Image (cartoon, rainbow, N blue to C red):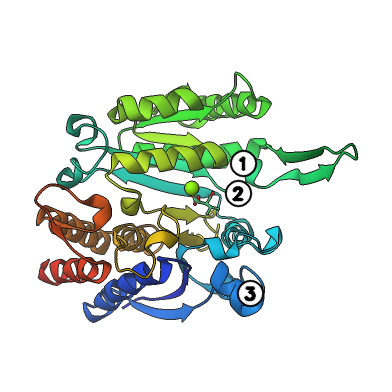
Amino acid sequence: MASYNLLLLPGDGIGPEVMAEVEKVAAWCQTTGIATFEIERGLVGGAAYEAHGQSISEADMALAHAADAVIFGAVGGPQWDSVPYEVRPEAGLLRLRKDLALFANLRPAICYPALADASSLKRDIVEGLDIMIVRELTGGVYFGEPKQIIDLGNGQKRGIDTQVYDTYEIERIGRVAFELARKRGNKVTSSEKRNVMRSGVLWNEVMTALHKREYPDVKLEHMLADALGMQLVRWPKQFDVIVTDNLFGDMLSDVASMLTGSLGMLPSASLGEADSKTGKRKALYEPVHGSAPDIAGKGMANPIAMIGSFSMALRYSFGLVEAADRIETAISDVLNAGLRTPDIKTEGATMVSTVEMGEAILKALEASK
Ligand code: IPM
Ligand code: MG
């Protein structure tokens, strides 16, 4: 049986609660003989700040570098609103992404039929939805320099962030999108704001050239990011793979999450470049939702996005496709049986806690073949 090193970083808020449910699924994988996991645990975000005065310690960064996959919960909370900007909880996540060079963030938005009524949109608009948002994750305005607030000396200050993309960054995220599209609906929608931004003009040119050169068999369309936001809520099933920059991807994936019923449903994978010798990629798996401090500790959090993220780790890092399919089927079975955490509440459903949802998924897994 293959063995993998996992680093679990539960973080803040509901992070530890949903991570506890993933640990049960990982244990199931071991007892079933799917794989064994060497598990390390670390701190990130506010939890790391309390312990080390940093949003992630050097020791935990070293563990992240060494891990086959990092499984990440969520960071942030109002109690850290006034800590210095450099050590705010989110800085830990951004450092992990940047230092591990996790440039490709895959955010699948799938609407399980049982949840079509939990979405704020009409059933026929979302039912059967299956789109993949590919978000560039280590560039753009998140990391561009200069990034500062300067004092203009006349009672005014100036806040500056820099949107910057180089050709190679656009090409490598484009390749990820085109490769994924070939295994799905064979269509890529590339999104930027070339009508306003120079970086958008370059993004569009590079995607067009890459398509022509390496992926002429895939259908490519371009859509301005504001129009794409509108189309996502108007008729989302027109999309297959969407590829976009860091900031637009952040916003559009939150929009897409509501098509699936709840932000508590969306998993994600953040991947680095494949090693030319081993083919291995650095990887971090995290739910798209945040730390949800308002419901933390109440047993109300939906563990599905976190469990789905673990399933993505099995699929993308370890090639355990069958096990990943089984987990996703178990999630679907539990939803079909009418079990719901509060965020996906629908008429006539059975309300369950975080732990009850996790255990129901485990039971469905045990019953599956
Ligand atoms: C996300 C989150 C993060 C981001 C925050 C927590 C820094 O919103 O992963 O979508 O903006 O990337
Ligand atoms: Mg976000």
Residue type marked 2 = Thr
Ligand 1 near label 2 (Cβ, under 8 Å)?
A: no
Marks 2/3: CA–CA distance: 20 Å
Rendered image: mark on residue 307: none
Left or right: 119, with 163 as reference point: left
Vertical comparison of 63 with 187: above or below: below
Q: Residue at x 37, y 70 (%)?
A: 297
| Disc on the earlier residue, 2 or 3 | 3
The reply to whether residue 325 is in sight is yes
Q: Which one is in front, 178 or 361?
A: 361
Query: Counting other residues with Cα less than 10 Å from the Cα at mark 2, is it few (<14), some (14-19), or many (20 or more)?
Result: many
**Pointers 1 and 2 in contact (CB under 8 A)?**
yes
Q: Which mark is residue 138?
A: 2
To which residue does mark 3 refer? Answer: 57
Cα gap from disc 1 to disc 3, whole angstroms: 28 Å
Q: Residue at x 66, y 71 (%)?
A: 54
* Tag 1 residue: 169
User: Residue 62: in sight, yes or no?
Assistant: no
Q: Which residue is pictured at 52% across the width and 62% down the height? A: 77
Image coordinates for residue 363, horizontal then vertical, percent: 14, 71
Callout 1 amino acid: Glu
